[in-house]
Image (cartoon, rainbow, N blue to C red):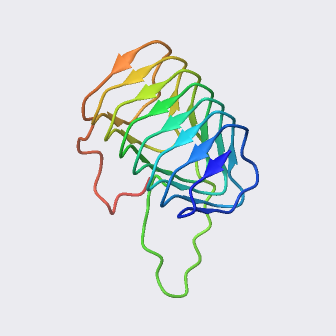
Amino acid sequence: MKIHSLSDVQTSSIGNNTTIWQYCVVLPGAIIGSDCNICSHCFIENNVKIGNRVTIKNGVHIFDSIEIDDDVFIGPNVTFTNNPYPRSQRSGQQHKYNYPKTKICKGVSIGGGATILPGITISESAIIGAGAVIAEDVKAKSIVYGDAAKYRRDIDTKI
């Protein structure tokens, strides 16, 4: 394994032949497989599992409850989210979440700038186009692209 001296890698769970480039932060609970390439300016949180032969390009942040299988390509500046209703922590309030699991299955390719909402499964060998907003599960061997934003409800409406 090669870890650039300008990265802060706190986990010891990294497979053989994995390279982590400069300005990355990897928290202690993360698990990273063998033969991975983690490019510069990436952040990998604690409750994250990354398989073997995964490429993560520059500027990707992988937060708790995200699992990435083997042979996945994640393009530059892909955005993963893990909280479906994020709010700023207010003074005196504790926020404890069971984040929904996001699963990126074997052989998936995600184009640069795509956004993956929480709790999504992208099934085996799917291709996600650059800039896509993924708001629902993606079936195996499919190609998806585009922006899914549309009005859902007022903020004061109870769920």
Q: Residue at x 57, y 62 (%)?
A: 5
Residue 122 in the image: above or below residue 91: above
Left or right: residue 59 versus residue 100 is: left
Residue 93 in the image: above or below residue 39: below
* Residue 103: % across, % down: 58, 34
* Residue 50: % across, % down: 63, 39
* Residue 146: % across, % down: 25, 29
Closer-to-camera residue (106/53): 53
Closer-to-camera residue (16/31): 16
Q: Residue at x 38, y 43 (%)?
A: 78
> How many numbered marks are there?
0
Left or right: residue 138 versus residue 48 is: left
Q: Quadrant of residue 124?
A: top right
Identify the residue at the far bottom of this view: 92
Q: Residue at x 69, y 37 (%)?
A: 33
Closer-to-camera residue (153/134): 134
Q: Residue at x 60, y 61 (%)?
A: 97
Left or right: residue 106 versus residue 85 is: right
* Residue 74: % across, % down: 45, 35
| Placement of the N terminus among the 4 image quadrants | top right
